Amino acid sequence: MDLIYDAVWSTSKPVNSNPCGKVVVAWSCRNLIAFSTGYRKLEVSEEQNPSSANGQNERSQITNGINILDPDCPWDVSSFSSGHEGLIQTLTWDGTGSRLLSTDLVGVCKLWAMKNHMVNDWECICTIDVGEGERLVAISWIDTGIKNLFSLSEDPQHSFMHKNLSDRFKTNRSKPPLVEIGGMRAKDGWVAISETGLICVTTIKPEVQVTRKCLAQVRTRVAVADLAFTSKGKVIVVANDGEPCSAVQFFRVSLSGGPGTDDCQIQSDPLPCLFPHSPTEPKNYPDYRVKNIQFLSKHSGEALLVCTTGPFGSCIKRWEMRKETIQLHERFQQEITHPRGGNYSVYEWTKVNTYDDPARIVCLCLPRIPIPKVDISPMNNLLTYPASILLVQYDDDRLQMLNCVGLIPSGSFRTKMKPSADSELGTAHKRARFSVASYNAGCLGAICYSPCCCCMVGITMAGDIRLLKLHHLGDSMGGTQLKRSLTDLLLYSLLTGWEWWDVLMAAHIGTPPDTLEAVSRQFTDEFRIQDIPQQHIRLSRFRAIKASLFRCMKDGAGQAVDCYVCQLLVAIAAAFRSLLKSSHTAAEQLAKISSTLDLEVDKVLQVLDTKELSLDSTTALSMFPLVQWLTDLAMFVVVAFTSQQNKESAPGVSLIRDTNTLGALREMLVLIRLWGQSTPAVLPSITPSADKNESLALLFKILTKIWLLSRQASSDEPDIHVDDRLAAPLIPNSTSLQNMQIGNLSRGVSGKAVSGTIRPSVYQFGSQPVAHQYHQTFHPFASAIFPMPADGSHVMDIVRRVYLDKSPETKLKQCTRCNCVSLVEGISDHAAARAWDQRWMRACVCGGSWRKLPYKEQQTVVAAATTTSSSSSNATAPVSVSGQ
């Protein structure tokens, strides 16, 4: 286990060693970390008040706040007041990772959601008093019933490859515990257990409704509890009162809707209980109390961890529900005749393993990725990603790793915070000063696994963050099993839609230099053997994963840009095809374009039925910025072919070898030429001094030759050659191509090349490191890719491809991955333009999430953009894309 970075609130020494009181943390499948800071006072800016005096943001102090951040950029944290009167006890993400549920000491639940899909702008949807003054000791969202179970490849060489990822990762279809009327869809809500033994079921649609019932015959105190869901739609509840020598009780809860209504009916049945410690055990456990109870799997209640703490340390025991045979007495065997013999079978809890430690448990976390039930032998098959490792934080500043099956120690990490040395990942503006006593010896008050269990985040008692990366255990020679496991996790993320940032960190930081390339190659090979329909469905996400792998490689920035270009090209092509007449004839006409090998665009139009591909002038003009981008991209391909085709890492080189991409781009040029015949204003500007029709025809001719060469790539001597002089009219002077800046591909923790020993970084919330403010440039041509630098000098909308308004009142949003910006609100009222804007409402072109650009930072953006425009006036102006 290696420390990646620390993120702190203040560089000064805190007065109180535990200023928060209680901290909690949760990591969503969308790669967002939510954590609370309790009583600690945080200074936040009032970003929602753009009309403040003199345009300055006011600052206020909040307590009991909720903080949400992207772990790739921990300095960009969004903090807001929760409004809870009591301390926040739990934070729980829903299955989509877009909604957050918070609870406090008095049982009040608040549901939070993003405004306009902005990761730094949250609003409270509803506030529900579920506990009615009682603390909720356990809470969980209602299970949806459908999960893809992760499983590792049996053979590291992976001799057998599945053609469908659904066959590779089996789907566990179980019955939801509570369904809507007339179907099998799970209701939207959550289940909670109160400290007096009440089970509380909350549903929020069509209206908020809370149903409560006692678990047992009488209400008793519950100190710790946990929930699990079975495949038959039952809820298994485990509870304990926290007293010495008390039993751990189990209940099977059935949830059902009322006949013809939305009412919820609860039925609770007791199950066999267990005692954590027995007097017959070799070791005595006097006055040991149950500290924590957790099911090993949330979709099965057959395995359990019981953690007890006493005056001599702590104890962790693993229990399993097993079927045991009871041998009847001889006298009863003679009097009772059983059809299956004289043996009876019952289910009872059996202790499997025990782990004792002289320190006391502070908190623990289990792997969250769903896996099938595995056999405990051989044990070495489990010591791999998503390493079935239980993480336990003890009060002696030690984070212990235990195997979930055998409770075998697999390593430990000292959480004591030390002064950080110079970091390779970037340093803060002001070096933070640490003291061992100031943070309660660095003890983590809450810990949580990442979605794919490759990383772990911990929150100190002072509310600071520590992010650690887990080592790959039980690896073979050359890291073969490590690369295979990382590839399996990327495939699982491709299927389920989970974010893969933690997998990227595991492959990028502290691994051999060839790990990323090997993982990328295996991932590509696995994707290519998938069924063609499956490839089309997941193509966009596949390219996003590939781009993230490339951007972490030493010379992969150019190929990452090509992946982003292909994503946008495919999206534009799909949008243009949707504008045509919805008939089979239009699809047949588009298919003819790829089957026609003519070099002249007019000859291609002669074999087509242009009536099926025509478009009205208003719709065509609303798409003009995208039309201009397509021709810019075609120019980019031509320049890359004529000047950089021998440079493997140069941007555009992978495009000239991609037949499908070139074919789609060629098809778009045909549509542009056709629409330009009826609407000349839609024709793009290619060469300022040349005729638009002639330039477009020449561009189509050259691109067609490159496309034909890519189709004949397997041939030793292709029949078609492209003369560089043919492209001379389009490119009069290669030096006239502007050296345009693109989005920062090295932004964030994962964007910096790291080799050798990991040197932890120290970041401060709200202060961007200097090392992450630089950007890259590519020549030739970049206006078709990301024409905005990474230091805030943004001039163009990444989605609409129009220049941004320099008015400070313009509302902007910024991508958390590539740092590009876009308008929050659309600029066109046309239906086609609105549909295109909604296509990128949830995510950027690169697949990253949007963040609301603060008002003060937006003013800085405008000023920097003006400076950049004036400094680049001496260079040749780029192709203008107006927003009219």
Image (spheres, rainbow, N blue to C red):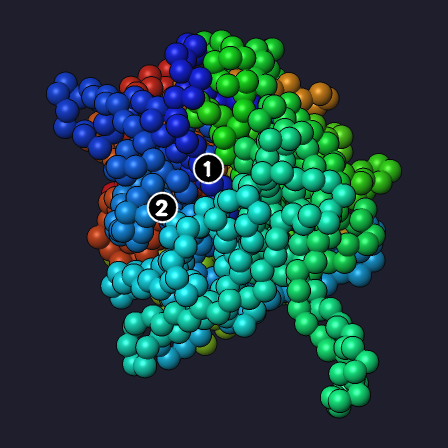
Name which residue lies at 27% across and 43% down: 123
Is 650 above or below relative to 196? above
Q: Amino acid at mark 1?
A: Val
Judging depth in this view, the residue of 253 and 598 nearest the camera is 253
Q: Is residue 114 above or below residue 776?
A: below
Q: Can you see residue 456? A: no
Q: Earlier in the sequence, mark 2 or mark 1?
A: 1
Residue 93 image position (x, y, % from top left):
43, 48
Write down the residue under mark 1. 25
Callout 2: helix, strand or loop? loop
Q: Please give the count of numbered marks on the rendered protein.
A: 2
Residue at the spot 36% in from the left edge and 72% down from the top edge: 265
Quarter of the image where one finds residue 58? top left
Q: How many other residues sit within 10 Å of disc 2, few (<14), some (14-19) or many (≥20)? A: many
- The image shows residue 114 at horizontal and vertical percentages of 33, 45
Q: Which residue is mark 2?
A: 135
Q: Amino acid at mark 2?
A: Arg
Of badges 2 and 1, the one in the foreground is 2
Residue toward you, 728 or 466: 466
Q: Position of residue 646 (x, y in %)?
A: 71, 34
Identify which residue is drawn at 23% across, 21% down: 59
Label 1: element kind: strand
> Is residue 826 found left or right of 760 in the rendered image?
left
State the image coordinates of residue 529 (x, y, percent, origin top left): 71, 60
